[in-house]
Image (cartoon, grey):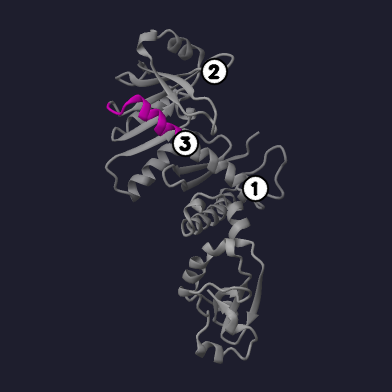
C-alpha cells in the first residue's frame, strides 16, 4: 500500500530536478503534470515548452483530453502497451517501417536494430487523431519489443528525433536512483504521525516535502560543486564527489581571526587547487565562530608547485596568535 508519493519535475538537458510535490498514495500523474505545467508557465517565458511524460498520463482518455487543452505545449507521452494497441501496431504494413541501427547498450556491444513507423490513434473526446510513433526493437533472442509514443501538438519533428528526445527521460529515472541510493530521498524521519493507526497511516505533507527538499537542495549544491571541477566530474554522483572531494583528511587550526583547514597535498589531485583558490577568494566567515574567516590550503610537504602562493598574508599571520604552521600553507 502506497501511503504517499513524491512527484518531481526534471530538466533532462541540465539533469536537475526543478520541482517537487508530496501527495497521498492515490495522487495522479496527470494532476501533477498540469500543476507543474502551470507553475513553469508562471515563472518562465519560453517560446515552446516540451514535456516528456510516462505512461501514467495516457492511462485514461480523460487525462489525454486535459493535456490536449494546452495547445502551445508539446507532449511526448509513452503509450500504454494494451493488447489492442499492440495488435494494431503489429498489423501495420512492413513498408511503413524505416530501419535504423543504433549503438549497443554498452561499449563494444552489437548495434541495436530498430524500426520506426508513424500512424495515428483515435482518442475519444479529442477531435483529431493523435500522432503516434511506433517503435519495434529487434531482440537478439526471443520476441521483439514493441512500444509507441503519443505526440501532442508537434507534426513536424522527425520520428527518430522524437524517440531520442523521449529517451532523455532516462536521466530522470537515473535521478530517482541516485536520490534513493546516495541521498536517501525516500526516507523521512517525521513522515508518519507517531500515534496514528498502522492500518491507516496519516498523511503529513509538510514533513515529507521538507525532508525531500533538503535532500534535493543538497544535491543541487553538489551538482554546482561538480560543475566547478574538471569536465569528468560535471555529472558525477554525490557518492563520487564525497569520495574524491569532500571526504579529505585535514588539520584544523583555530586562530583569533581565522579557521585554517590544512589539507594533505596529493599530486594526482592537483585539480582541486582552483576550487580551493575560489573558496578562499569568497572570504567566507562563520558567525557562530565569532566571525572567524575560513581559509583552506595544502600543507607544504615535499615538492611544492612553482606557482604556489601562501594562503595567509603577512598581516593575517601577524594576528594569528603565533599558530604554528600558518606560514607553510599554500594554494
Q: Nearer the viewer, residue 120 or 191?
A: 120
Mark 1, other Cα within 10 Å: few <14 / some 14–19 / many ≥20: few
Mark 3, other Cα within 10 Å: few <14 / some 14–19 / many ≥20: some
* 143 w.r.t. 260: above or below: above
Q: Position of residue 13 (x, y in %)?
A: 41, 44
What secondary structure do most residues of the magenta stretch adopt? helix
Are dots 2 and 3 in contact, CB under 8 Å? no
Are dots 1 and 3 in contact, CB under 8 Å? no
Query: Which quadrant of the structure image shows residue 319?
Result: bottom right
Residue 104 appears in view:
yes
Which residue carries the number 3 mark? 169
Q: Position of residue 67 (x, y in %)?
A: 37, 31
Which residue carries the number 2 mark? 139
Q: Residue at x 45, y 32 (%)?
A: 167
**Left or right of 135 on screen, residue 152:** left
Q: Residue at x 71, y 37 (%)?
A: 199
Q: Nearer the viewer, mark 2 or mark 3?
A: 2
Task: Label 3: state its secondary structure.
Answer: loop
Magenta-highlighted residues = 156-168
Which residue carries the number 1 mark? 187
Task: Label 2: state its secondary structure.
Answer: loop
Amino acid at each position: 500500500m502506497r501511503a504517499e508519493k513524491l512527484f518531481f519535475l526534471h530538466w533532462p538537458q541540465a539533469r536537475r530536478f526543478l520541482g517537487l510535490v508530496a501527495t497521498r498514495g492515490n495522487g495522479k500523474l496527470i494532476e501533477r503534470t498540469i500543476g507543474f505545467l502551470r507553475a513553469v508557465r508562471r515563472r518562465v517565458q519560453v517560446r515552446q515548452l516540451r514535456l516528456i511524460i510516462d505512461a501514467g498520463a495516457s492511462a485514461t482518455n480523460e487525462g489525454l483530453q486535459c493535456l490536449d487543452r494546452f495547445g502551445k505545449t508539446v507532449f511526448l507521452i509513452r503509450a500504454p502497451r494494451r493488447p489492442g494497441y499492440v495488435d494494431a501496431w503489429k498489423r501495420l504494413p512492413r513498408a511503413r517501417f524505416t530501419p535504423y541501427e543504433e549503438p549497443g547498450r554498452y561499449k563494444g556491444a552489437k548495434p541495436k536494430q530498430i524500426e520506426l513507423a508513424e500512424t495515428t490513434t483515435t482518442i475519444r473526446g479529442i477531435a483529431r487523431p493523435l500522432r503516434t510513433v511506433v517503435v519495434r526493437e529487434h531482440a537478439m533472442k526471443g520476441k521483439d519489443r514493441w512500444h509507441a509514443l503519443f505526440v501532442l501538438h508537434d507534426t513536424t519533428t522527425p520520428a527518430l528525433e522524437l524517440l531520442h528526445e523521449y529517451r532523455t527521460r532516462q536521466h530522470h529515472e537515473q535521478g530517482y536512483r541516485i536520490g534513493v541510493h546516495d541521498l536517501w530521498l525516500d526516507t523521512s524521519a517525521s513522515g508518519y504521525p507517531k500515534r496514528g493507526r498502522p492500518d491507516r497511516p496519516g498523511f503529513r505533507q509538510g514533513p515529507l516535502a521538507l525532508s525531500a527538499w533538503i535532500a534535493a537542495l543538497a544535491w543541487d549544491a553538489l551538482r554546482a560543486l561538480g560543475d566547478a571541477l574538471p569536465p569528468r566530474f560535471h555529472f558525477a554522483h554525490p557518492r563520487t564527489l564525497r569520495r574524491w572531494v569532500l571526504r579529505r583528511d585535514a588539520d584544523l587550526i583555530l586562530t583569533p581571526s581565522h579557521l585554517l583547514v590544512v589539507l594533505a597535498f596529493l599530486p594526482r589531485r592537483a585539480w582541486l587547487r582552483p576550487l580551493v583558490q575560489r573558496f578562499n577568494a569568497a572570504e567566507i566567515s562563520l558567525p557562530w565562530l565569532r566571525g572567524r574567516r575560513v581559509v583552506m590550503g595544502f600543507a607544504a610537504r615535499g615538492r611544492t608547485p612553482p606557482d604556489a602562493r601562501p594562503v595567509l598574508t603577512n598581516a593575517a599571520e601577524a594576528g594569528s596568535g603565533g599558530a604554528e604552521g600558518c606560514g607553510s600553507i599554500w594554494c
